[in-house]
Image: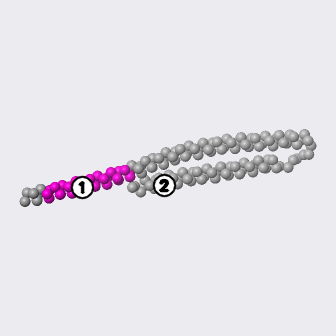
Amino acid sequence: MNNTTQATYGDVAAETTTLIIDAIKSSNERALQYWKSVWDIVAAPAESTSTGYDVRAGFDRLDKVVNLTVQELETSIKKNAHVAETLIAQSTKLQQSAAETVRTVVESGLSSAKQAVETTNDRIETLVRGDKARAAA
């Protein structure tokens, strides 16, 4: 087997694993930041005690949470699409590397089989020549 091909496959697999771990890390960080922001909006102290103001402030807070949620969903969709595209590219690299590994193994096996056939033919020819020499004597 070709060690270069194995290293390449290993490198691609390591890159893919790193990509997945980074995507999970990024997603978790975004989720934590999102919920922190929601908490900051919801838990902010009321500036007034009047009923009309409380209703208006409640709708303002709701509007901020909705806008924050829409923004987070847009970001999440873009990030997930990028990760998916990258994983597809990595998958292609892994397939190519695996195919190269299989090709190398098959070529090595065929070479070994060819050498075994040649060695067997040489021995048969040697035996046949030896039998002819004994028969002629």
Q: What residue is disc 2 on? A: 10
> Going 76% across and 47% down the picture, which residue do you hit?
38
SS type, badge 1: helix
SS type, badge 2: helix
Percent x, y for residue 87? 55, 46
Percent x, y for residue 73? 68, 42
The local crowd at label 2, few if under 14, some if 14 to 19, many if 20 or more residues have their Cα within 10 Å, is: some
Q: What residue is disc 1 on? A: 120
Q: Which kind of residue does numbered mark 2 sit on?
A: Gly
Q: Nearer the viewer, residue 95 or 45?
A: 95
On the picture, is 3 further left or further right than 114? Answer: right
Q: Nearer the viewer, residue 135 or 120?
A: 135
Position of 60 relative to 22 (above/below): above
Q: Is residue 52 magenta?
A: no
> Going 84% across and 42% down the picture, which residue do you hit?
58
Percent x, y for residue 55? 87, 40
Most distant residue in the right direction? 50
| Segment tinted magenta in the rendering | 104-131
Do residues under tags 1 and 2 come within 8 Å of each other at their CB atoms? no
- In three-dimensional space, the C-alpha distance between marks 1 and 2, rounded to whole angstroms, equals 38 Å
What is the tally of numbered marks visible in this picture?
Answer: 2
Which mark is first along the chain, 2 or 1? 2
Q: Which kind of residue does numbered mark 1 sit on?
A: Thr
Q: Which-is-in-front pick, marks 1 and 2?
A: 1
Characterize the magenta stretch by its predominant secondary structure: helix
Quarter of the image where one finds residue 1: bottom left
